[in-house]
Image (cartoon, helix red, strand yellow):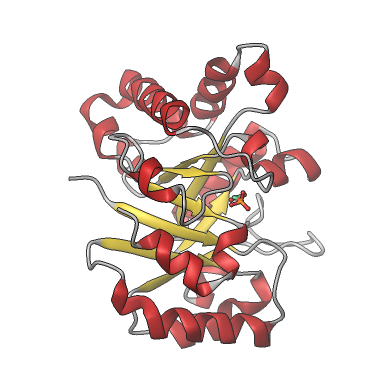
Amino acid sequence: MRRKIVAGNWKMNTTPAEGKALIGELLSKIADVPAGVEVIVSTPFTHLVPAAEQLSGSRIALSAQNCANKESGAYTGEISAKMVAATGAQYVILGHSERREYYGETDAILLEKTKLALENGLAPIFCIGEKLEERESNIHFDVVKTQIEAVVCQLSSEELSKVVLAYEPVWAIGTGKTATSEQAQEMHAYIRSVLAVKFGKQAEEVAILYGGSAKPGNAPELFSQPDVDGGLIGGASLVADDFIAIAKSF
Ligand code: PGA
């Protein structure tokens, strides 16, 4: 049995006070979520220390949304994997399409970040996915394969065992346009086949989340697909009732 995971990606939303209130609401409703479902919230950096304290002893895990590709030193404005781990966060989202697109994060940079995250005891939630024009030109499988081979296939199998993957078609993120459950299943099965070339049977154990306009209304069908192991939730993770409803959708 693979892990079932629902992770909320708050992106650049909420003040620390608003984040504290949202976590409070999630904690008050988390008992409704079946015990086998892992729930993660990914807050802005500024919220990590108090969020770790607020979540301590609960079943909700904490994630950052990024970390630096350098260990330490003169990199003004950056936050290292070691610093993130010291906050008490257990996960870090890496390779999100917004980081790739707006902040020029290449596969080479993402491999450095992924290695540093793992060395510092953080579990990467590693995102991959094609843009609309890539799907329309029918190169979406190649794009995703390249993203996986450049980073995930560079890891050892022990490192892979810490990684969660998230397939997020860029055309579905924040657009209200969800991939159909067939499109998601097709790509998730393909991702597993790419992993299997290097990792063999271990590919069956990797949790692959779907992300992109997932909502309480479409999560049950998405999560019912055999290779969809949960979701990375943006907009809907900012509303406690919606996020909890999604986590109950398995
Ligand atoms: P969305 O974002 O759910 O708002 O589409 C998903 C993500 O970018 O992780």
**How many callouts does the rendering have?**
0
Hey, which quadrant is residue 178 in on the image?
A: top right
Query: Is 119 located above or below residue 32 in the figure?
Result: above
Whether residue 156 is visible: yes
Residue in the foreground of this view, choosing between 121 and 190: 190
| Residue 81 in view (yes/no) | no
x and y, in percent, of residue 190 in the image: 40, 22
- Where residue 56 appears, as percent x and y from the top left, is 39, 84
Q: Residue at x 42, y 68 (%)?
A: 244
Looking at the picture, tell me which residue is in the foreground, 105 or 213: 213
For this view, does 101 lie left or right of residue 139?
Answer: right
Query: Residue 8's x, y, as percent?
Result: 52, 62
In the figure, residue 96 lies in which quadrant? Answer: top right
Relative to 211, does residue 82 appear above or below in the rendering?
below
Residue at (36% x, 55% y) in the render: 5
Left or right of 56: which side holds 111? right
User: Which residue lies at the image location 61% right of the left edge and 11% below the top edge?
Assistant: 138
Q: Quadrant of residue 177?
A: top right
